[in-house]
Image (cartoon, rainbow, N blue to C red):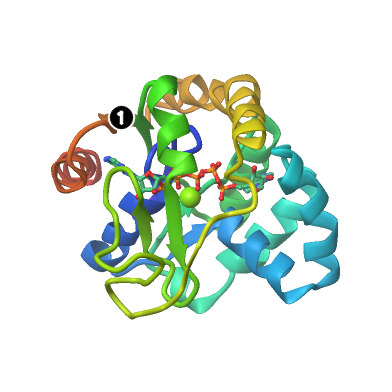
Amino acid sequence: MRLVLLGAPGAGKGTQAKKLIEKYQIPQISTGDILRKAVADGTPLGKEAKSYMDKGELVPDSVVIGLVKERLSQDDCTNGYILDGFPRNTAQAETLDSVLADMNASLDVALSVDVDMDILMKRLTGRRTCKSCGQMFNVHFSAPKKEGICDKCDGELYQRDDDQEETIKKRLDVYEEQTAPLIDYYSNKGILTSVNGVGNMEDIFKEVIAKLDTVTK
Ligand code: AP5
Ligand code: MG
């Protein structure tokens, strides 16, 4: 299954993607995670990307599209993948379509995780992520058993640099302006489905699976 996850910052794309990896045995391709790793490693790409990410702006398309093309050509993508955070605007979506067409492939489904804007700020300021395994927690909604320590692997939890209130506001604006139009883009292609992203994470996951099963059968 070739799946695009759509949704505002904090909607729960990463949270649901982690569960989908296990269920469908396909990789998550998160452009945000790839860029954050490049920043942490101090690579030239990371240095370029950091200035955009810290401001809550999109990294230039040329940079991100190159990363995704390279990733999609790797062996573990043969049976499909979960694109999380890509595409982010119409230009990226159109390029993705043509890259896939060149590979004789196309997307199966775009799944939008819908959450009202007023909930997102609390989710993002409260988010903590494990440095080792990437598991997400939330100090307001799903706190780790021991403060600062991952329940799954005992790794150290950190707060993302872009999860500061001012940067979050900018990210939400960028989402509305540039990414939300993709809902119509995929709807027009007939591959859009959506779930309510508010509520218990496991219940949301059940709805996600139910929606994906109807689309892919
Ligand atoms: P990216 O990493 O993609 O961030 P984002 O889109 O802003 O989305 P988030 O990762 O913040 O949210 P999420 O939906 O994954 O939520 P999560 O599951 O963590 O991008 C970061 C930056 O990189 C961009 O600003 C840009 O600069 C750059 N970038 C990335 N891709 C790019 C691209 N294609 N083009 C250009 N630039 C790009 O959940 C959030 C919190 O809520 C967690 O604490 C979680 O535990 C909690 N939570 C989740 N579900 C629930 C629930 N049901 N109930 C209660 N709490 C919940
Ligand atoms: Mg994410």
Residue 165 lies in what quarter of the image? top right
Is 54 situated above or below 82? above
Q: Amino acid at mark 1?
A: Ser
> Where in the figure is residue 76, as x and y percent of width and height?
45, 75
Q: Note whether residue 59 is visible.
A: no
For residue 177, side relative to residue 208 (left or right):
right
Find the residue positioned furthest to the front: 147
**Which residue position holds label 1?**
194
**Residue 129, can we see it?**
yes
89 displayed left or right of 193: right
Q: Nearer the viewer, residue 212 or 143?
A: 143
Q: Is mark 1 within 8 Å of ligand 1?
A: no
On the image, the x and y values in percent for residue 43 come to 80, 73
- Which residue occupies 53% across, 56% down? 159
**Quarter of the figure with the N terminus:** bottom left
| Location of the C terminus (image quadrant) | top left
Number of marks in the rendered image? 1
Does 71 sit above or below residue 103?
Answer: below
Quarter-of-image position of residue 97: top right
Q: Which secondary structure lies at badge 1? A: strand
Relative image position of residue 67 (x, y in whole percent):
69, 61
Task: From the top left corner, tell me how far across and down residue 184 is, in percent.
Answer: 48, 19
Instruction: Find residue 68 and report its image quarter.
Output: bottom right
Task: Give whichever of 35, 103 is nearer the camera.
Answer: 35
User: Is residue 139 or residue 36 the one in the foreground?
Assistant: 139
Q: Is residue 24 left or right of residue 27?
A: left
- The residue lying at 20 percent from left, 38 percent from top is 211
Q: Is residue 32 left or right of residue 2?
A: right
